[in-house]
Amino acid sequence: MLRIPLLDLHRSLGGDIGVFAGFETVMSYGDPFAEHMAVRRDAGLFDISHMGRIYVSGTGSMDLLDLLVARDMRESRDGSMVGPTAFLNESGGFRDDVMIYRFGQDRWLVVCNAINRDKIFGWISKWISDRGFNAFLRDVTLDTVMLAIQGPRASEYISKIGLRDANALKPLEFMENLDTRFGRVDVISRSGWTGEDGFEIVSSPSVASEIIGALRSSGVTLAGLIARDSLRIEMGFVLYGEDIDETINPYEARYWVFTRGKRGCVGCEALGEIARRGVSRVRYMVRLKKGLRIIPRRGYRILYEGEEIGYITSGSYSPYLERPIGMGYIRSSHSLPGLSVDVEVRGKYYEAKILDYPLIKR
Amino acid sequence: MKQKYLITHLLRGEGLSEISVKGYRVRRDLLYTETDEWVRVEGDIAVVGITDYAQKKLRNIISVELPRRGSSVSKGESVGVVESIKAVADLYSPLSGEVVEVNERLRDSPELLNHDPYGEGWVFKLRISRREELDSLLSAERYAEKIGRE
């Protein structure tokens, strides 16, 4: 079992500790609904150190990444993130969805899903040795901390703790080696996975621990992965292993992680073929009735007049919409936003509506 | 006199009325099931709830499906469902009998199961029909051992 570096700090601050993707980490600080609402209305702080962080460097690193990811890496700019994009398999299925930071043509940071860290490290390594790229990998996941401060007031809090310079960042831009009163921040970016404005920070555990303390004193709500999950579902953001995997392609997921018409990357030819052929299932959201206190869970069936037309891949209860929400794959013949369907929960049918994402307007 | 005071004092102390296993509270005055329900016997009535271990494993509980008042239930029968953000768990009747009361407050405040599992978070009461079934329930010590193994 792995553990995020600051687990003891979170425990001492009242964190409810659980396991996600093989990491002991913070599930909540006791009240995930309040944490969710804090992110929508004010700001919340997540420790997302479980996320994989792999540096790719060397003169061949741009060609290497351009071969392996579905977006055109040549169009990227220094100081900007590419993404979300994806590593695909030869059939066009998802190996992983990732964010890639471009420091320069010769240096990149790949942030991948925790459950795929070994797989992606191995996948990139294999291509380096097969094709002889001049490229090197360094996995810093277990030695660094990654924080996400998210919410409409995130930039105010960032200023309050003295990181005002970061407010100059536009969405998906980042700064490197920012000197702060807490010490050096390796990377700070304007990004997140909640649908809100916000920042993501990579630093040493000691610097991160100071930042957590300062943000907490300034009034930011500490939040855990349960709230992070309900926030991303409201926005229709996918989670690898739940909503996408090796057998699902970006068209089915309607997850636009690729540059259309890109040639020569792993999975790119397959993508072209998929688009010509069309898809038989499509990812959509479902929204259940207000006030219901159930959760549509992975594998639950979606029906229309008793006939199965799809299945749920992830769901939650939205404290913002005060109702159960979820997402799943619907047979393309019935992928009709607005259509009333049923979700089967333990043998009972609950009325739901097929909707496009996001479920909330930001 | 002095000794008697001391004993009373000790009996009231947390250490004697509760066992703590890996941070989970097990009350000594209750009986337990393998499926993490607790039972308090009050004459021919059994009060049933879910244990501190169960609520902590489930985490934030958002709803409870309660058994129907007046229904006859058998030992081991699924009589309700506890849903948390993380998971869904069946609630099993620890004994056979008739459901004489359910905790209506749980419909609007299911979080009582998290906040006070052995008190305000009780789930239902049944009139015991087969008293010999009490022998099959676990003592606090045996239940604590079970948690310790998991």
Image (cartoon, coloured by chain):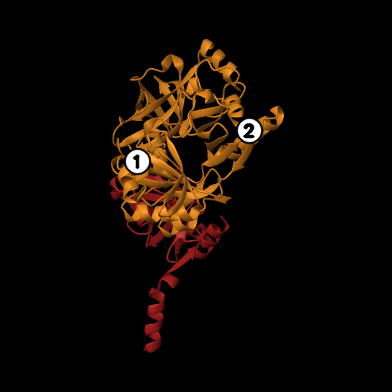
Chain colours: A orange, B red
Q: Picture coordinates of residue B47 (x, y %)? A: 37, 56
Q: Which label belongs to residue A223? A: none
User: In 3D space, how far apart are the residues under numbered discs 1 and 2 (Cα atoms)?
Assistant: 34 Å
Please state which of the two labelled residues, at mark 1 or mark 2, is closer to the viewer: 1
Name the chain letter of the residue that bears numbered label 2.
A
- Quarter of the rendering containing residue A332: top left
Mark 1 — residue? A167
A169 left or right, relative to B19? left
The reply to whether label 1 and label 2 mark residues of one chain is: yes
Q: Camera-side residue: B115 or A27?
A: A27
- Quarter of the rendering containing residue A333: top left
Residue B117 appears in the rendering: yes
Q: Which residue in the rendered view is the most extreme toward the bottom?
A: B1
In the rendered image of this protein, does residue B44 appear above or below residue A122? Answer: below
A63 left or right, relative to A291? right
Residue drawn at x 57%, y 37% as measured from the top left: A116
Residue drawn at x 42%, y 66% as measured from the top left: B29
In the rendered image of this protein, does residue A229 appear above or below residue A179? Answer: above
The residue type indicated by label 2 comes to Ile
Residue drawn at x 40%, y 61% as measured from the top left: B41
Q: Camera-side residue: B127 or B110?
A: B110
Mark 2 — residue? A124
Q: Camera-side residue: A184 or A151?
A: A184
The residue type indicated by label 1 comes to Asn
The first of marks 1 and 2 along the sequence is 2
